[in-house]
Image (tube, helix red, strand yellow):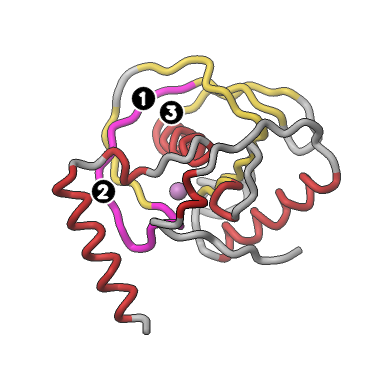
Amino acid sequence: MALLEILHYPDKRLRKIAKPVACVDETIRTLVDNMFETMYAAPGVGLAATQVDFHQQVIVMDISVEKNQPLCLINPTITKAEGTEVSDEGCLSVPDIYEAVERAARVSVSALNQQGETFTLDADELLAVCIQHEIDHLKGKLFVDYLSSLKLQRVKKRLLKARRARL
Ligand code: NI
């Protein structure tokens, strides 16, 4: 396995639209393994292929405290979305920034697993947020896109400061 480089906002490659995976083969399975390793090492609860500059529809997640419930979604589609909920979100591509975002409270998603088999999943709370956040990545969308322009300006300033501090 290998750690992959995570792209950081405002890298333009984060705006690419991911294509559906045509065939869940060894290349995809290796990517999934490397994405899990990269996500756990970060550490984060979710990672989309877009964030590691691979533009096919692959997501890995693990929202468990023990980090023992890996979940992989290939070609995910939200088939149902209900209610609204606001929660603070962060993103491995936007380090150290946490902002409130409104999402659907409950979603149903259909996807392929690492073996290429179709499955469906009903999610609420953090898992529902995570699924919507990661699917957004595949569409070239970031959680900061939901912020008001004033809040976004503040976020950009904080990111610039953090980058300077790391020099
Ligand atoms: Ni993210």
* The C terminus lies in quadrant: bottom left
Magenta: predominant secondary structure element? strand
Q: Quadrant of residue 2?
A: bottom right
> Which amino acid is tagged 3?
Asp
Q: Residue at x 24, y 57 (%)?
A: 155
Kindly identify which residue carries mark 1.
Answer: 104
Kindly identify which residue carries mark 3.
Answer: 124
> Which amino acid is tagged 2?
Glu
The residue at the far left in this view is 150
Q: Nearer the viewer, residue 35 or 144?
A: 144
Q: Please rate how many residues cluster around mark 1, counting C-alpha atoms within 10 Å: few if below 14, some from 14 to 19, many from 20.
A: some
Kindly identify which residue carries mark 2.
Answer: 99
Q: Residue at x 52, y 51 (%)?
A: 13
**Marks 2, 3: nearer the viewer:** 2
Q: Which residues are magenta?
A: 91-107
Queried on whether the Cβ of the residue with tag 1 lies below 8 angstroms from ligand 1, the answer reads no
Locate residue 97, reporting x and y percent: 30, 58
Q: Nearer the viewer, residue 151 or 92?
A: 151
Queried on whether the Cβ of the residue with tag 3 lies below 8 angstroms from ligand 1, the answer reads no
